[in-house]
Amino acid sequence: MYKRLLAVMLVLAIASLSSIKASAASNPAFTTAHVYQDKTLCADAEFMTGIGKDLTDLGAKFKATDVKDVPSTANTFLVIAGMRQKYEDMGSVKPECLDLQFETIIAFSNASDILALAMAAQVDTANADTYNKILPDQLTRFQNSANNLLILSGIATPPADGSSVGRISSITSAKCEDADFLTTLGTDLQGFSDTLNSTDMQDLAAISQSILAVSALRQQYEDLKAPSGCELTQLAAIMTLSNATDLLGLGLAAKADTANAKPTRRPSIAR
């Protein structure tokens, strides 16, 4: 039941996302009908086609993953991390495509969270039922992030309330001066540091639990409405936490898949 639910939900999400590629190819220059919040949507056909291909590859990778096998799941977790990092490292994205770039990062982060829950259920069997109950909510979260990609690509309908989906285009200032926000961030990052330092990297269950804890903190900042001027600080925190889960995931993969632990070399993850 667990694997069937995972497969069905992901097929539905990825199928809709693959339309980004088709849209970019058939309509590389969006018309005035595709203007959202008075900001022109991304019209870079090559960039959008690349996203569509990566999301299609993501769907294929999910289908090939045995979510009852720790090495298989951990490997897919790392593959998705590599996909996300590619978009983090892109430095030549056109200004009108920056919102789409960042939401792609968010979508891949939430796809990784699905695998994190699957790994947790495998290695922390005492709490497996708890993780499996959380899975549908995480699948919904991933679908919502996927829908944001469709909106920013001009494929799906924007929110009826007129709220902005794009995070980059909503930035008002690069100077964060909100004391409460900065204090809370400092406290959260200290807790995050404590989590990393206290994780027993020889214990699969402990690593998996830490991945989920860091992912939950990242999601908290994804959902947060940052004070004016603190949006860039918020986005930096999100990407920092995403890369921290990559490191933990790499540690889990090395521990669970000893056959490939030594030859595995992923320098992009140690960021």
Image (spheres, rainbow, N blue to C red):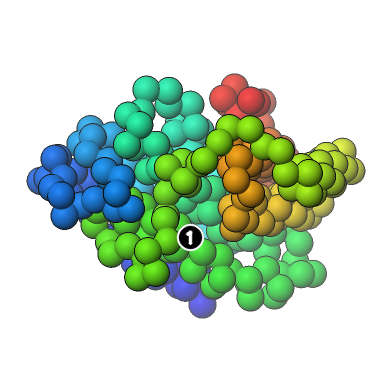
User: Which residue type carries mark 1?
Assistant: Phe
Of residue 55 and residue 27, the one placed in the foreground of this image is 27
Above or below, 114 against 259 in this view is below
Q: Is residue 69 visible?
A: no
Where residue 147 sits: x, y (%)? 37, 60
Above or below, 199 against 271 in this view is below
Where residue 30 sits: x, y (%)? 16, 45
Dividing the picture into quarters, in which one does residue 116 lie?
Answer: bottom right
Please give left or right for residue 206 compared with residue 154 in the image: right
Q: Residue at x 55, y 36 (%)?
A: 173
Where residue 124 sits: x, y (%)? 76, 61
Q: Residues within 10 Å of mark 1 (few under 14, many from 20)?
A: many
Of residue 227 and residue 123, the one placed in the foreground of this image is 227
Name the residue beneath numbered marker 1: 142
Count of numbered marks: 1
Q: Residue at x 42, y 42 (%)?
A: 169
Please give left or right for residue 240 compared with residue 32 in the image: right
Q: Is residue 190 visible?
A: yes
Q: Residue at x 74, y 47 (%)?
A: 181
Of residue 251 and residue 134, the one placed in the foreground of this image is 134
Spot the residue most to the left.
Answer: 26
Q: Secondary structure at mark 1?
A: helix
Where residue 63 sits: x, y (%)? 40, 57
Dividing the picture into quarters, in which one does residue 263 lie?
Answer: top right
**Quadrant into which the C terminus falls:** top right
